Each structure stands twice: as structure tokens, then as C-alpha cells.
Image (tube, rainbow, N blue to C red):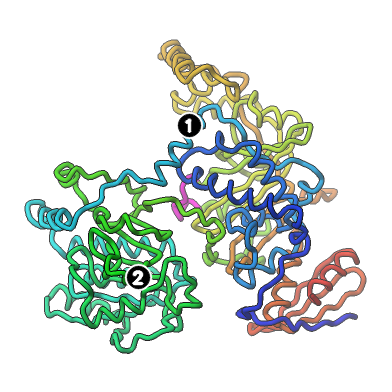
């Protein structure tokens, strides 16, 4: 019997955690990493704006391969490493997150260590390098109108005059858009306590509306409203917030460090009608908030500030001419940015107020970016290149083994239905990873077209790269990513072609346009021009106008018979839930068994939450007992002695 007690520091300990040793072996790789990061930043900006394939040159590929070979982050964390930036500064990540890279050895890492190649596309058939670079330029210097103070007021009058809007209507949409923009950058999981400072005019009204929506989004807003008015609109907005039990505080009670009480500040003091220098009591508040966009809230005591329409105290056209020193990291311009916004250099600039009708656009010759989908706000200005700072806390749910279906296809079905119900865009989109006979991996997104106990199906051109990889090796891996639910499903197994009758039936169920497209496209081969493809399409369209198009022999379905299915649910601090089911064949039937939960997770829970842990083993199985505030939990792991050893090392670490 072996017992060990953990004595790790609590989670909020500010201690800097050394990077895991395998990652630290970077004296040689350090400069390559920096180069990779610089290039990745440019690449990331291009990803945001356009298809990127053609800008990823061989140098980037080499740099990234170097990085991948230097790092030892666990499985999915290679993705995390790229997006959350453990390339540059793993020590700037939250304390508990820094530890995660210490655990586990992923199959991806093993594959890379064996010398397999990481996959990067270097060529795109349909995207020119020039096109991608132009898209990047466009994002850096947005083609957008900036308004003078006079124009802003004139638009206001036009909206509320001939165009029939009321002030509370516009205020509602403006405040909602600010709340939505805040949610994009400062999630309530980390920035729950919001101080909204409201001025005497409509900018202050936007602040009230924003505060109300923030409440409904899961934040805890507090209001500072130094100069009250008796106007019914404002009294109503105040009453609405009081009914939500939002506290109101006096300006005198505000003092540094504001970070003790608030995680983010909304500056709704003055908008486009501001003139001169802030008068009391706003002068003191502006002074208190006067820190640059890149300063550290822990040092200044000022949480990140979001300014509505204009950073308060700034001249509406000339910016911070009074040198208030107030430079918030986030600005939400309404209707269109005012000239002062040209002097805003913070990382987050959004446009809100999705209510500008074409009559205003025409009359004032406005150039405005389109709002995506149903969004109330759109990011403008240069894309954020601080990839290291991009991280979300996963809080959408948990996956408990006891709640999961025993049959993985049934479990997949549950999650797939959840994804459909959650309105995830194309929930049947999945990445399909294949490998050629000589070990070159490749990956792309395709659409799942059916699943049942026999496997997961999709259709493609048999002559494509994936088609030939699958014919050569007969193996593939699928991955589904459902962002709103923070869930991932990974499926690996053997692949076979579907019977031709099944491919025929599916082919003829497709819209005629898709059938012709499949027949016309010489998949994965370079075509002289797009018009060649279009000509071929038109020719087939004419030929088969009134008759059935036969399924091309080169086009059909595949089925992956799963051998491993992993269900992954994101959790806070990267302590995700994973449930891995692997197939095992008994004499009578194929069955599934649940693999052990990630050892690292158990080790982490013990090590970083300072929970008492006891381990007992009898040579065949290891019983780990953990005391937590929810009671005593037991985990039994059936593993070989070497695995026991590593678990014991993890727990004792
Ligand atoms: K403001």
C-alpha cells in the first residue's frame, strides 16, 4: 500500500510556474519560436479575413514544425498552444493553466516526435496570394467613415426627425450593442463585476441600457450616476436597474484600486456632444481612469475600461487634446466612429448601433462595415494580433461518465442533437484527417451525411487527396467541434467505400446543381481557370436538363467504422472532461469500454486544489481516493505498474 498527501499551493497563489521541462528545452528553439509567433500573428490576421492557404510559406511551416517538435503540450493543447500562446509566454497564462502542459503525452506529440510531418497547406487552387494580402490590408485600415461632431448631431436629428425613430428606441439598440461587444471581449466568467459610470446625456442613457443587458448576460453591474435628471426616460431606466437590484454608488466612494471591486468599467459619461474639459464630479473620475490601454490593471488598480462612442474627456474630433491620459483598451463607436476614434489605438474597437437606414448612408455618404449574421456589433480597426491573450474559459457544461450513454453512437447522437438544438452552424461539419501510404497527414472539413451502429458516412470524389489516402491506408480520424457547447468528439477507425447502391441513392437525393457540380469538378487537380469549370458545368446542365445524371464512378461514399471515440467537454482552467470509449471484440460481439480518465486530471485535482489523496494498489489496479468538499470520490484504474508509477509521480509532484 502506498499513501501520499498533496501539499500544493492553492489555485490563486501568484507564484510563477516554470514551464514543463520538455518545453523548456528551447535554448536552441527560442528564436525559431519567436519567428514562428511573429509569422503566426500575421497569419492569424489573414485567417480572420480570408482564406489563408496561399500565404503560409515554407518558412512558416518550418517554424511551426520546430515549435511543434519543441513543445510537449498535451493532445488538444497543441491547438491551444497556438491559439493561447504558450509559444511566447506560458508564464503569463493563469496559474492553474500553466500546469496543464506538464501532463500527459498526446498521440499527436508522439506522432510528431516520431518524425511524422505536421500538416500545412502551401498551395490553394482558388486563392491567390495577392488576394489574401489585400484582405489583410483591408482589416488593418478599415474603409469606414469618421464623423465630425456636426455630422453626428445632424444624423441624430435626421433619425429622430424625418425617419421616425424615438430616442429610447435608438438608445435601446445602442446600449444592447455595447453589451454585446463587451461580451465578445470580457466574458462574465472572468469579468463579472462591472462598474457603469453614466453621464447626464444620452451617452449616459446608453450606459443604463448596457448595464441592464449585461445583467441579463450574467454580469453583476453597479451604477455610478453622479448627475441625475428628472426626465421620464432616465427615471424609467434607473427604475429598471433598481428592480434588478443593481447597486448605485456615489462618485465619492470610488477610489483606487478599483480592481478590488470591479473587473471592467463602462465609460458612459460623455458622447458626441461633449465640449471643453470635464467638469466636477466627472473630472476626478476621468483622472482616476487615466491609464494607457496596455497597462496592467493589477499595477494601476484600474480595470479595463470600455468607452461608449468616445473616451470621455476627449475632444470629439481631435482626441485627447487636454492630455487627460485616459486611453481605454476598448471603444464601441455608435452609428459610425467620430473623428476622435482615429486617435484610439487600443486593442478593441467595435462598431455598434445596428439601425442606420440606407437613407442616412446615402445622405451622409457613409462607408460602414457589414454586421455579421444577427450580430449587434462588428469589430473594426486592425485585427487583434495578441494571439497569446486569446483564451476563453469553458463553462458551458460538464460530462459525467455516469450520465453518458454506454453505447458511443447513442452518446454521439445525444450530443449531435444538442448541437442542432443549440443552432450550431453546420453541426455536421467535421474535420477528416487522412494519411498517405508514405505517412503524410492531411486534413480538411467535410459534411457528415449519416451515422448509425455501422459507422459514420460522408461522400467525396474518390480521386481526391482524401480519396486516394483512404484507398491506400483505409484509416481516418474525424473530429467534430461544437463551439457554443464547448464540446469536441474525436473518432478514429477503419474506412471502407459504401456500396454503390447507397452512393447512387444519396447522389440522386442531392439538388441537381450539386450533382452537376460533382460531375463537373476534376477534384484536387489544378484547373486553368474558374471559367473552365463553369463551362463544364453549363455543358452538363444543358445535356442533362431533362434526364437523370448518372453518378460519376469517381464519386461516392465512405464509411468509418469507429474503434475509438472520445467525448470532450471543455471545463474551466483547462480541466476538461474526457470520456474515451474504445472498441474491443469479444467472441460474440463488438463491445465498447470506457478508458480511464486522463491521469493528468486526477493528478491535477490532487496537486492543485490541495486535496488529501490516498493511493492504494495491488499490482493489478490502482485505487485513488480523493477527499473534496463534495465528499470522498474513488477512481479505480486498471493499469500496468509503469503507469502506476507515473500516476504516483504525478500525485506526489
Ligand atoms: K463615453
Q: Nearer the viewer, residue 636 or 478?
A: 478
State the residue position of label 2.
326
Helix, strand or loop at disc 1?
Answer: helix
Q: Residue furthest bottom?
A: 253
Residue 496 image position (x, y, % from top left):
71, 33
| Crowd band around label 1 with a 10 angstrom C-alpha radius: few (<14), some (14–19), many (20+) | few
What residue sits 31% from the left and 76% below the top? 286
Q: Spatial distance from mark 1 to mark 2, Cα to Cα?
A: 39 Å
Whether residue 167 is situated above or below residue 502 in the rendered picture: below
Is residue 333 in the magenta section? no
State the residue position of label 1.
130
Asked if residue 127 lies left or right of residue 97, the reply is left
Residue 457 image position (x, y, % from top left):
62, 38
Residue 495 image position (x, y, % from top left):
71, 36
Whether residue 4 is situated above or below residue 525 in the rendered picture: below
Whether residue 452 is situated above or below residue 547 in the rendered picture: below
Q: Which tag is nearer the camera, tag 1 or tag 2?
A: 2
What residue sits 85% from the left and 48% below the top? 587
Instruction: State if disc 2 and disc 1 touch (CB < 8 Å).
Output: no
Q: Quadrant of ligand 1?
A: bottom left
Question: Disc 1 or 2, which lies upstream in sequence?
Answer: 1
Which label sits on residue 570? Answer: none
Q: Residue furthest right?
A: 619
Q: Quadrant of residue 622?
A: bottom right
Q: Nearer the viewer, residue 472 or 553?
A: 472
What residue sits 75% from the left and 72% below the top? 603
Residue 536 image position (x, y, % from top left):
48, 14
Helix, strand or loop at disc 2?
Answer: loop
Image quadrant occupied by the N terminus? bottom right
Q: Which residues are magenta?
A: 418-426
Amino acid at each position: 500500500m502506498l499513501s501520499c498527501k498533496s501539499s500544493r499551493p492553492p489555485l490563486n497563489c501568484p507564484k510563477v510556474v516554470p514551464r514543463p521541462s520538455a518545453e523548456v528545452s528551447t535554448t536552441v528553439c527560442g528564436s525559431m519560436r519567436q519567428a514562428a509567433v511573429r509569422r503566426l500573428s500575421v497569419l492569424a490576421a489573414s485567417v480572420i479575413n480570408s482564406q489563408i492557404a496561399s500565404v503560409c510559406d515554407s518558412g512558416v511551416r518550418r517554424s511551426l514544425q520546430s515549435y511543434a517538435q519543441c513543445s510537449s503540450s498535451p493532445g488538444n493543447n497543441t491547438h491551444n498552444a497556438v491559439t493561447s500562446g504558450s509559444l511566447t509566454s506560458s508564464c503569463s497564462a493563469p496559474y492553474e493553466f500553466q500546469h496543464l502542459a506538464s501532463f500527459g503525452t498526446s498521440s499527436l506529440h508522439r506522432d510528431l516526435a516520431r518524425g511524422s510531418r505536421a500538416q500545412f497547406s502551401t498551395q490553394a487552387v482558388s486563392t491567390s496570394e495577392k488576394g489574401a494580402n489585400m484582405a489583410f490590408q483591408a482589416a488593418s485600415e478599415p474603409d469606414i467613415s469618421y464623423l465630425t461632431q456636426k455630422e453626428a448631431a445632424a444624423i441624430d436629428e435626421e433619425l429622430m426627425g424625418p425617419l421616425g425613430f424615438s430616442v429610447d428606441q435608438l438608445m435601446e439598440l445602442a446600449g444592447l450593442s455595447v453589451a454585446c461587444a463587451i461580451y465578445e471581449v470580457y466574458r462574465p466568467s472572468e469579468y463579472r463585476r462591472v462598474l457603469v459610470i453614466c453621464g447626464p446625456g444620452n451617452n449616459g442613457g446608453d450606459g443604463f441600457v448596457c448595464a441592464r443587458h449585461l445583467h441579463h448576460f450574467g454580469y453583476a453591474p453597479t451604477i455610478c450616476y453622479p448627475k441625475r435628471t428628472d426626465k421620464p426616460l432616465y427615471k424609467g431606466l434607473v427604475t429598471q436597474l433598481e428592480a434588478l437590484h443593481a447597486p448605485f454608488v456615489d462618485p465619492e466612494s470610488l477610489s483606487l484600486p478599483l480592481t478590488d471591486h470591479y473587473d471592467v468599467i463602462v465609460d458612459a459619461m460623455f458622447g458626441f456632444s461633449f465640449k471643453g474639459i470635464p467638469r466636477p464630479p466627472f473630472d476626478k473620475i476621468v483622472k482616476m481612469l487615466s491609464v494607457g490601454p496596455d497597462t496592467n490593471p493589477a499595477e494601476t488598480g484600474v480595470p479595463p475600461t470600455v468607452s461608449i462612442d468616445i473616451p470621455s474627456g476627449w475632444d470629439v474630433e481631435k482626441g485627447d487634446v487636454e492630455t487627460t491620459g485616459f486611453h481605454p483598451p476598448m471603444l464601441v463607436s455608435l452609428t459610425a466612429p467620430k473623428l476622435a476614434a482615429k486617435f484610439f489605438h487600443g486593442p478593441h474597437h467595435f462598431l455598434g448601433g445596428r439601425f442606420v437606414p440606407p437613407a442616412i448612408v446615402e445622405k451622409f455618404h457613409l462607408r460602414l462595415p457589414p454586421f455579421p449574421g444577427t450580430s449587434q456589433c462588428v469589430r473594426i480597426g486592425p485585427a487583434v494580433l495578441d494571439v497569446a491573450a486569446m483564451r476563453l474559459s469553458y463553462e458551458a457544461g460538464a460530462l459525467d461518465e455516469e450520465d453518458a450513454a454506454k453505447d458511443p453512437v447513442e452518446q454521439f447522437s445525444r450530443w449531435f442533437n444538442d448541437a442542432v438544438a443549440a443552432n450550431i452552424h453546420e453541426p455536421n461539419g467535421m474535420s477528416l484527417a487522412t494519411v498517405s501510404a508514405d505517412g503524410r497527414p492531411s486534413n480538411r472539413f467535410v459534411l457528415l451525411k449519416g451515422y448509425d451502429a455501422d459507422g459514420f458516412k460522408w461522400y467525396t470524389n474518390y480521386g481526391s487527396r482524401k480519396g486516394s489516402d483512404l484507398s491506400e491506408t483505409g484509416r481516418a480520424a474525424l473530429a467534430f467541434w461544437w463551439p457554443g457547447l464547448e464540446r469536441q468528439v474525436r473518432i478514429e477507425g477503419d474506412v471502407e467505400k459504401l456500396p454503390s447502391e447507397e452512393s447512387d441513392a444519396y447522389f440522386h437525393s442531392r439538388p441537381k446543381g450539386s450533382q452537376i457540380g460533382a460531375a463537373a469538378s476534376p477534384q484536387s487537380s489544378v484547373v486553368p481557370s474558374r471559367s473552365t469549370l463553369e463551362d463544364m458545368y453549363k455543358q452538363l446542365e444543358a445535356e442533362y436538363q431533362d434526364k437523370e445524371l448518372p453518378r460519376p464512378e469517381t464519386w461516392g461514399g465512405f464509411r468509418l467504422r469507429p474503434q475509438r471515440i472520445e467525448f470532450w467537454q471543455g471545463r474551466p482552467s483547462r480541466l476538461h472532461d474526457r470520456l474515451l470509449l474504445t472498441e474491443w471484440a469479444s467472441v460474440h460481439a463488438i463491445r465498447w469500454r470506457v478508458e480511464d480518465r486522463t491521469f493528468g486530471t486526477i493528478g491535477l485535482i490532487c496537486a492543485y486544489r490541495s486535496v488529501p489523496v490516498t493511493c492504494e494498489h495491488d499490482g493489478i489496479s490502482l485505487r485513488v481516493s480523493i477527499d473534496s468538499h463534495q465528499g470522498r470520490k474513488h477512481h479505480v484504474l486498471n493499469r500496468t505498474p509503469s503507469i502506476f508509477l507515473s500516476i504516483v509521480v504525478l500525485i506526489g509532484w
